[in-house]
Image (spheres, rainbow, N blue to C red):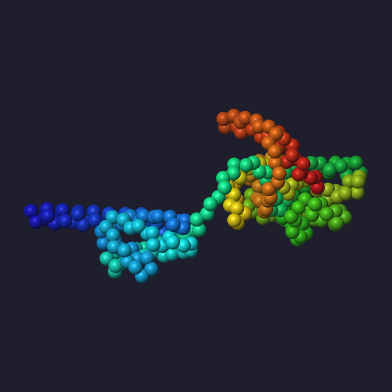
């Protein structure tokens, strides 16, 4: 009989330990709340919550309203019987802000980090022969050119100017391919109009449309729906360096099909305007 009682007590003790362990694990390490927002922390018998120098004893829950009076940061200490420290909760209190819902269409122009290679083509030289300067260099569509002869490249115009400035001499190109930085050398070809070409189609920006969800008048900030942007030619995610909003009008909408969203034809034509042959 005594052995049975001991086993029952052991099982009861283990259940209590398991219950308290779960309760401690369910207490968050960090909380983000708005100024004046009420939060409730679930606790168990013996658990105590200390806000600053004040200890709040609780059986089932603790209402932490004393810390939400003004924006800033606060630390709440959870302990057992006020002796055993269990966890500190870091709380960020954000100022309560009123925003204006919008839902308006906004044009977006995005600038790439470097210059994106979106295609390749043969170059007709001054001798009327066809050349592929990029051939066997390792560079391909979807790569991003970041440097030419150790000079940072941020736009297509800058790339064209740098290539033409060497007057046909071999240029050393640094580019990013599948998140790996690589280097190659290309000898530009002189064309009949006295320009030097690499045979690459490049782009430093892309355009699209988005939706502004809200606007905050006092700080003039806004929020908008965001997602990864793919290039119209390479269908790869664009590595974005910066961007800006532009005036936009919706001219037509083409309904997509299940599993195959359709690209707006006007958007496709507009995107190709940003391509340049170098």
Left/right placement of residue 227 relative to residue 63 reads right
Left/right placement of residue 257 relative to residue 49 reads right
Depth check: give the residue in front, 77 or 150.
Answer: 77
Left/right placement of residue 36 relative to residue 111 reads left
Most extreme residue toward the left is 1
In terms of image quadrants, where is residue 169? bottom right
Left/right placement of residue 95 relative to residue 11 reads right
What residue do we see at 64% from left, 41% from top? 105
What residue do we see at 46% from left, 62% from top? 70
Q: Is residue 212 in sight in this rendering?
A: yes
- Above or below, 111 relative to 66: above
Depth check: give the residue in front, 156 or 166.
Answer: 156
Q: How many labels does the image show?
A: 0
Depth check: give the residue in front, 187 or 37.
Answer: 37
- Above or below, 246 relative to 169: above
Q: Is residue 90 in sight in this rendering?
A: no
What residue do we see at 91% from left, 46% from top? 193
In terms of image quadrants, where is residue 39? bottom left
Q: Where's residue 219, x and y in %? A: 60, 56
- Above or below, 230 relative to 168: above
Q: Where's residue 278, x and y in %? A: 81, 47
What residue do we see at 33% from left, 63% from top? 49
Q: Where's residue 79, x and y in %? A: 32, 64
Q: Where's residue 56, x and y in %? A: 31, 63
């Amino acid at each position: 009989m005594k052995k049975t009682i001991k086993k029952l007590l052991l099982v009861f003790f283990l259940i209590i330990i398991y219950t308290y362990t779960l309760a401690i694990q369910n207490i968050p390490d960090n909380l983000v709340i708005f100024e004046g927002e009420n939060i409730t922390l679930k606790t168990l018998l013996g658990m105590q919550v200390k806000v600053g120098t004040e200890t709040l004893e609780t059986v089932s829950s603790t209402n932490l309203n004393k810390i939400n009076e003004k924006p800033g940061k606060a630390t709440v200490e959870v302990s057992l019987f006020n002796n055993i420290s269990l966890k500190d909760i870091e709380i960020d209190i954000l100022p309560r802000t009123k925003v204006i819902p919008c839902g308006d269409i906004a044009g977006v122009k995005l600038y790439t980090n470097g210059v994106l290679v979106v295609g390749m083509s043969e170059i007709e030289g001054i001798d009327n022969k066809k050349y592929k300067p990029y051939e066997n260099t390792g560079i391909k569509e979807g790569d991003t050119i970041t440097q030419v002869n150790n000079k940072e490249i941020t736009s297509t115009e800058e790339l064209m100017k740098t290539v033409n400035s060497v007057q046909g001499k071999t240029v050393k190109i640094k580019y990013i391919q599948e998140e790996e930085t690589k280097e190659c050398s290309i000898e530009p070809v002189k064309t009949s109009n006295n320009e030097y070409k690499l045979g690459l189609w490049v782009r430093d920006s892309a355009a699209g449309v988005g939706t502004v969800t809200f606007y905050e008048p006092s700080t003039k900030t806004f929020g908008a729906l965001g997602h990864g942007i793919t290039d119209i030619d390479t269908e790869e995610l664009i590595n974005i360096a910066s961007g800006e909003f532009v005036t936009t009008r919706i001219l037509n909408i083409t309904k997509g099909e299940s599993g195959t969203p359709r690209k707006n034809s006007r958007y496709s034509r507009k995107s190709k305007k940003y391509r340049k042959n170098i």
